Amino acid sequence: MSIIQPGFSQNPADTAAILRPALGLALVMLAICGGIYSVTVTGISGALFPEQANGSLVSQNGKLVGSALVAQPFSAEHYFHGRPSSADNDPMATGGSNLAPSNPELRQRVAQTSAELTARYQIAATELPVDLLASSGSGVDPHISPAAAMLQLQRVAKARGMSPAQLEHLVQQHTELAQWGLFGQHRVNVLLLNLALDAQHPLS
Amino acid sequence: MEVILIFTLALLLAWPLGHYMTGVFSAGPHWSDKVFLPLENGIFKLLGVKPTQGMNWKSYGIAFLLSNLVLGIIAYLILLFQHVLPLNPNGIEGLSWDLALHTAVSFLTNTNQQHYSGQAQLTYLSQGFLIVTLQFVTPAMALAVCVAVLRGILGGRNADDAGEGEERDLGNYYQDTVRAVLRVMLPLAAVVAVALSSQGVPASYSASPTVPVLEQGQSLSEQTIPLGPVSAMVAIKQLGTNGGGWFGPNSSNPQENPTPVSNAIQTIALVLVPMAVVFMAGGMVRRRGLTLLSLSVMGFLSLLFIALAVYSEQQPNAAFTGLAQQAGNMEGKEVRLGTDVSALWATFTTQTSNGSVNAMHDSLNPVAGLITRSGMLIGGIWGGIGCGFVNFLVYVWLAVFIAGLMIGRTPEFFGRKLEKREISWLGVLLVLPSAVILTFTAITVAFPALTGNSNPGLHGIAQVFYEYTSAFANNGSGFEGLGDDSVWWNLTCVVVLILGRYLPLVIPLLIAGSLAKKRRVPTTAGTLPLFNPTFAVTLVTVILVVNFLSFLPSMVLGPIGEALELSQHTAVLATQ
């Protein structure tokens, strides 16, 4: 078995012999990984899971109203509200606050949200679910915790003229449990819950 | 619970994969030849490479560096001219020259540090074609170097008929790289990509639809839902210890990581191949002891770090004291994931050189922030594909040397003596991280106009330190609050990236090549046994002490100082 000896030669033919595999490798890999792999995998995924592969879009009455995976801003009394967003819920500009626990700016922001929420719901600050004060990593977290939904129950029920028990039932229907019984936290998808509200108990 | 389940599943899957990889990279036929050999032979013909022709460490190293250079130039040109190239339905602009350079080098070095925001600044061609290719090829290249180093440990493929001092055959670089892509990375990535799409990760070449939001009259009246061949890229960025993501906030983005199951798949994919390399290494050198030693040392440190990080994030964020329930730190985290698996991910992603995130590291509690930095600095707990195990071997050599000194014997590894030449190069590797990271951090912190960070005080220093650490470790995660798309940041990071990638791979290759040529001394009662608990404890100590000595002062200025500051702050608030 021969072993290639190291070192560049001054002979141009040798330089070519060393460059050719390097350039060839780059081009072949661009074709296989960037081309064939990407197109094939994207094609198969799209064919097997058309809905999921195209952004999990949701429509109501035949009209697109958003994506089940992307939070929307809500502030009206008759809707459940999502988490604070550092990206103004814009899926093209996602991101978190990137504020460290030691940052006074974070303390200020949380204090302001806390004051608003305690005033709105008339409970002690230390009862507030953390996810309603903490901004998410993506800025478009579509979920809130069940506790955060329960906190808003009375307000939404009143605005919609529903009985709290009726609404609680709807919230429970929209509470996702651990996936496959193993993975993840209990959570409520805010957009889907609000869409269900509009469909079942439209504002008169 | 979920944390232990994911860790165990990853280990269980890595075992057979490592066994398969041993077969793929060993001499002699393997069952996978039937599937891949015809395609491979076609590629070798195109490249003008004779796969059976071996290379010594120098030829191997030159081939490695040269193929990187060529790939880097192509990548730079594509990024620079992406706006005039096809596959740009969203009309995205070209990148500035320094951002294009940083991005090209960052992906070339398997780092994937991002100074841009994916969905807004890169075209489908750049993301889905170029970057995906780099994400396959760069881990394969490092894996090839790792395989060559392992062959060197046994004296090369021609160990049986080469005499002392003769050139040793460490394998063929192109054969190893092509096999690593075709036989290992591609099949894994295809499975993971389709599985992720089933959970809701987009896989489409259509332009992104714009939809009005449900409740009108707010600051945002419509949303553009980003699409693209996302799942194909996410699969390989996880599997290839690449990191980054299609979207700026990576896998915290619900479109990139829609469900807890997709999170479990991505977490396993993150450590799968680095864990499999540990199983492969024992097979390649035909000593199960090496796998057991590596598994116990890496497993111990990994689990220790995970436990600390999980505990840290279950504690409340200090900024929330008295303003909300006493519960885990949810700032920068997603509700569907919660704190535990976010902490698990943060630990794994910094131990391996992956660097993608599923929670914002800037907003972690200080202890978890410390853990993430330690994982990157050590670089050999699982580590990046190929380079992680090579780093680990460097620690083993160091421990052999130190233990040899302590008991007064010539240090030897697999029957070959570590002498002045090898030890000098080990010394270089030992000093390199602190020299590079601390120098650049010091310069940047000295000129506040350069830093552009989002946090004041100690955390501001920590952000700068983190960015260079992440660049050197070829990790790519970041304290994202840094305004890092500036000429200064782009260029200095390019230098750090290159130093952190190529020296820690090429120097061990040199050492292995030099060891391989030596005469084998027979094992005697005086030989230091490597595969026993005593040596494992020595190794853990060496790993921790080396890193403590290098980085304790900067840790005190960063996360440790911050933690003390916060606990004082919290105490004050509690008394109010």
Image: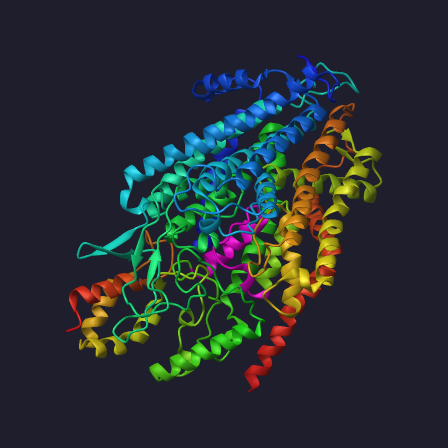
Q: Percent position (x, y) of residue A198?
A: 20, 66
Q: Is residue B411 left or right of residue B59?
A: right
Range of residues picked out in magenta: B338-366
Tell me if residue B480 is in the magenta stretch: no
Residue B155 located left or right of residue B25: right
Horizontal side of A31 relative to A163 (left or right) equals: right
Indicate whether A172 appears above or below A55.
Answer: below
Q: Nearer the viewer, residue A95 or A149?
A: A95
Residue reaching furthest to the bottom: B576
Rendered residue at 65%/26% (across/down): B63
Residue closest to the far top:
A1
Residue B125 vertical position relative to residue B224 in the rendered view, above or below: above
Give whichever of B10, B247 is nearer the camera.
B247
Q: Where A161 sits versus B186, above or below? A: below
Q: Where is residue B520 drawn, in percent x and y?
A: 76, 24
Residue A196 appears in the picture as rendered: yes
Q: Is residue B58 left or right of residue A34?
A: right
Characterize the magenta stretch by its predominant secondary structure.
helix
Measured from the top left, where is residue B231 in percent x and y? Answer: 40, 43
Q: Could you say which is closer to the camera, residue B544 or residue A76? A: A76
Identify the residue at horizontal 50%, vertical 71% (top origin).
Answer: B316
Magenta span contains residue B341: yes
Q: Residue furthest left?
A: A204
Count of numbered marks: 0
**Residue A27, horizontal then vertical, whole percent:** 52, 27
Q: Quadrant of residue B454?
A: bottom right
- Tell me the quadrant of the picture where the C terminus of chain B can be found: bottom right
Q: Is residue B11 visible?
A: no
Colour setup of the view: rainbow
**Image quadrant occupied by the N terminus of chain B:** bottom left
